[in-house]
Image (tube, helix red, strand yellow):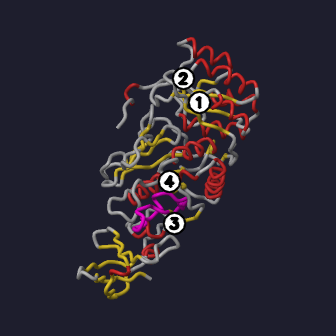
Amino acid sequence: MYRKVKVVLDNGDVFEGVLIPPTQFSEPDVVVVKLRNGYNVGFRRGRVKEVVDLGEVQSPDAARRDLPRMEGEKVWLLATGGTILSRVDYVTGGVYPTLSVEYLFEVLGGLEAPIEVEQVAAKFSEDMTPSVWSQIAARVGEALQRGARGVVVLHGTDTMHYTAAALAFAFRSAPGPIALVGAQRSSDRPSTDAVLNLKAAIAVAARAPFAESVVVMHKASSDSVIAVHRGTRVRKMHTSRRDAFQSINAAPIAEYHPEKDLLQVNAEEYKARGPLDYTTKFEEAVALVKFFPGMHPRSLEVLLDVGIKGVIVEGTGFGHVGEYLLPSIKKLVDAGVVIAMTSQTIYGRTNLYVYRRGRELLSLGVVPLEDMLPEAAYAKMSWALANFKREDVPAVLRTPHAYEISPRSDPLVFGVP
């Protein structure tokens, strides 16, 4: 039950708003109130002279029950945590995760399809691992098996593109889209992007003709358009902007226009809805390593000590590393470790045939990955090692499975926002 209150401070200041119930993360000496302008404010109890109860207000649970329920195929919503499911701690200023998704429905303004909500985890995205990808893939698969038209995964933004790529490889075929969605600003802030992103993700899950793993986030800093990025072609390009996610070496597969409630598909080619075919297996013993000038050879060799089976290297330019690393790379390859090369330039593609260093890497058995993004390559290596024989993995890495490799790099999509 939520109560509207008037808080009178010891200096005579008066604030009215909704009293926020305490949680396990709350500071016991602080009273938090949501003001009418949408901001939350915290007051030390020692400064509070009086709290006047102004009556009950509708709870998020009640608001969700009152939303119209439309007939038809359900959309499954799987919550894993992240900023989209976080609130601000007004003592420390930090943001903490919560399992509740109910308050998001309070401001959605209606649903276009029946929604089934399940909790998978309460994690920030930096706590995601390939084993958690396996859990998410299993839950997505169960939802699709139970007849879901599409699945929405609420996820933290920092590693959402890793998970999106992992699901793109895990689901070789699916009867509906898998839309990952997050927020750059927590949902209890007036400037939040959580609600609009979630509305767009539900629209994708309910309407999209494609059946791919995608990331649904703001295309611009304004609320004008929400971009739908392919899970293997997207990267987080800014720490805090609402349009932080951008498709790299490709254009977004679709866009959602909130004012028109229009989902516009841009891609001429995509995976259509089909029979469910997926795996939940990912290999944990994979590393993503960025080359830098002066990198110590031991930085690579130590990976053998912890049992790493596959390494994605972010090389310079076309995909190069220092000559002093070649003996270490040979040592790993001879030990059975699969090493594949991407570029830290982000745009463009690797080419190990241009310079001598690239040809030396090829002779050692390093696998060039064309224009695959390092994050997508990491997810693909994890998937490939878990689902194919070791000797087949290099060929699997070089073969496009989920639009992670394009035939050519389009100069028209180059640029950083």
How far across and down, in percent of the image, does residue 179 sit? 51, 51
On the question of residue 58 being in view, the answer is: yes
Asked where in the image residue 306 lies, by quadrant, the reply is top right
- Tell me if residue 395 comes above or below residue 105 in the rendering: above
Q: Which residue is tagged 1?
A: 313
Mark 1 vs mark 4, foreground winner is 1
Which residue is depicted at the point 35% across and 73% down? 34
Give the alpha-carbon distance from disc 1 to disc 4, as whole Å: 25 Å
Residue identified by numbered label 2 = 319
Residue at mark 1 to residue at mark 3: CA–CA distance: 35 Å
Magenta highlight on residue 80: yes
Q: Is residue 217 magenta?
A: no
Residue 306 in the image: above or below residue 4: above
Image spot of residue 94 (x, y percent): 44, 61
Binning the other alpha carbons within 10 Å of mark 1 as few (below 14), some (14 to 19) or many (20 upward) gives many
The amino acid at mark 2 is: Gly
Categorize mark 3 by other alpha carbons within 10 Å: few (<14), some (14-19), many (20+): many
Q: Is residue 196 left or right of residue 166?
A: left
Q: Is there a contact, CB below 8 Å, between mark 2 and mark 1? A: yes
Q: Are marks 1 and 4 in contact (CB under 8 Å)?
A: no
Q: Which residue is mark 3?
A: 98
Q: Is residue 78 visible?
A: no
Q: Which residue is mark 4?
A: 156
| Residue name at image x 30 percent, y 83 percent | 6
